[in-house]
Amino acid sequence: MWDTVFPYLLSGISVGGQYALIAIGYTMVYGILRLINFAHGDVFMVAGIIMVYIAASGLPLWLCIPLVLLITVGVGFLIERVAYKPLRTAPRMSVMISAIGVSYTLQNLVLYITGGLNKQYPTIPWISDTMVIGPAKTKVVTVVTPFLVILLVVALVLLINRTKIGMAMRAVSKDFETSQLMGIKINNVISTTFIIGSFLAGVGSILFFTNYPTVIQTSGAMPGLKAFVAAVFGGIGSIPGAVIGAFIIGIMENIIKGLDVILFKAGLTSAPLGLATFSDAFSFALLIIILLVKPTGLFGEKVTDKV
Amino acid sequence: MNLKRSKKPMIITLALVAAVYIAVFIAEQQLPATSMLFTVLKKGAVYALVAVSMNLLNGFTGIFSLGQAGFMLVGAYVYGIFTIPVVQRAAVYQYFDGGVIQFTVPIIVAVIMAGLAAAFFAFLIGLPVLRLKSDYLAIATLGFAEIIRAIFQWNGLGPVTNGSNMLRAFPNFNDFNIKDTQGNVTVYLSTLIPFIMAGVCILLIVLLINSSYGRALKAIRDDEVAAEAMGINLAHHKRLAFCVSSFFAGVGGAMLAMYQTTVQAKSFTSAMTYEILLIVVIGGIGSVTGSVFSSFLFVACSEWWLRFLDEQQTIGDFQVPLLRNGFRLVVFSIIIMIVVLFFRRGIMGDKELPDLLSRRAGKKGRAVK
């Protein structure tokens, strides 16, 4: 039993970690702008595509990775400046539509550049190596991911709680206008948020595409949505919440993917039920349940609507 | 406000609409059936209906729903399942022994069933989801669309839905053409019928919008709390709008099935919803005419007018750079972003065609602002 479940659990933890890195971007942006950044999943995909092209240009890999992260951060920064900043005073719906427009644009741009073909992600040495843990054979990246995620989250929490820019971020997310009156340069804070979010999405993409090594213009959509679900699940605006939510979703999703095999091996079913179809739907079912039972998520703060 | 408005612009509008229908009918008899124009008109009619139904929710009720593709999927499947001829079923459901449903219903009944099924799903989904606000509602409806997609693709339902395989061989738009005994087409109706279907549905939506229900929906959009204080039952009206919108999205899905001639669950992704949302935005959130115009514009640009951007072009000896497969979509996205960022009111704002035709209404609109 354990031998059957373990590989799924392992890849669940790994995928969960990658979702966590994307989810942090969602949760931070939502915390500050109250905006679901629909384009965030596509930033993640763009990071993958950039890696494909930079690695193909023949640069050494130790140079590729920082370069990819740098460009991804630039993309995130640019998106905010071009598509969200002009709409600062517009209704929330307009900003959300703009986010959807950006997502559409990024996907079409990548479609144009790649010609709509699957691109093979370059193999990154060491983390692509296979290793054996107990009954499972997996890539090193699977084991590295959770530790890297924890490291990055600790660094991020320190940044938010101990530095001046972190304090500004907290102030802006509490009250947009008052913090502006207190002399906080809102635009800088928002840009920083997008930069951090894109950076983490970039790291996440390197880890994710090492496991699933093809990139196409739509490969950001699903992970993006799931990461968003994770952010809501953990309580949007809360970073630890997003991370925990992402791990739960990653693990559950992979268990469901393997449920047919697990049930079969345990002797509970005699034929495959085709439950793997529901691995994506499960995340959304979870989202709807959490929204109904506890709309603020696991660690979210309660917001009341003022008239 | 409606009562005070003079009748004249309304009559002109109706005359224009009638003229369009006659023009479509004549064009169809005269031009070759393979003309790109008809592809655009057919698909445009389908998208117009779907966009207007989405506008009913997003523009008139202020419910930011992103579940449109899911309801279209339900409609398309219900239509397909109940109209595939019995003799074809063994071939279509080849992995499921011909499926369990061994009868067909007339097309019009199937289309209405498609709408009702979508409305039923909407009712069920609305029970939990409509309690949510703005962006949470958006993401929950998006999630439900994904769940519906997974359910329809599930092998366990294969005998009904054909699992992840495509449905085909059901009657499509070309079957509306009237043929003589030799199979030669005598009267072309393959574009007019979708126009009539979409037209009737849009008319029903317009009538709803202009009824007391419609005014209640607009009140909810403008201020929920105030609307509730005025005695409008929020839950009831939101549910009504959600179900009606989904009904027409379901009908639109059935028409999309007829247009495409095949249906497969995996094509009804959130990207499709986004596309429809962008059509609504370009047309103007809260304008039925805007949605209709922008649907045809969107389809014409993407299927026809901007096609040249996808092919290499030379002017004299000059090879125009950048032009290759996919460039059309890039140009398209940039146009959309410009509209979203700088022309947030879209083509029509919240005006309708009769408003534009009467100058008085235009002044009144400004006075209200």
Image (cartoon, coloured by chain):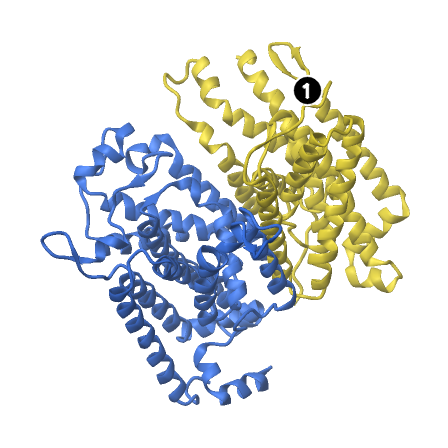
Chain colours: A yellow, B blue
- Position in image of residue B326 (x %, y %): 54, 48
Q: Could you say which is closer to the camera, residue B2 or residue A37? A: A37
Q: How far across and how far down the image is residue A280, in percent? A: 51, 35
Chain bearing mark 1: A
User: Image height check: is A50 above or below B25?
Assistant: above
- Which amino acid, by three-letter code, is at mark 1? Ser
Q: Residue at 61% across / 23% down in the picture?
A: A11
Image height of B36 relative to A193, above or below: below
Image position of A238 with respect to B5: above or below = above
Q: Is residue A170 left or right of residue B190?
A: right
- Horizontal relation, residue B15 to residue B185: left or right: right
The answer to whether residue B356 is above or below residue A295 is below
* Residue A251 visible in the current orientation: yes
| Image quadrant where residue A86 sits | bottom right
The secondary element bearing badge 1 is classed as: loop
Give the residue furthest to the front. Answer: B317
Residue tagged 1 = A128
The count of marks equals 1
Q: From the viewer's perspective, is A123 left or right of B266? A: right
Residue pictured at 53% horizontal, 41% vertical:
A284
Name the residue at 43% across, 16% down. Answer: A264
Compare residues A161 and A189 and report the one nearer the observer: A189
Closest to the observer: A26 or A121? A121
**Residue B259, how many percent across, how many down?**
33, 52
Residue B99's x, y, as percent? 24, 34
Q: Residue furthest left?
A: B181
Q: Quadrant of the C terminus of chain B?
A: bottom right
Specify few, some or many for label 1: CA neighbours under 10 Å numbering under 14, 14-19, or 20 or more.
Answer: some
Q: Quadrant of residue A49?
A: top right
Q: Can residue B66 be seen in the rendering of this structure?
A: no
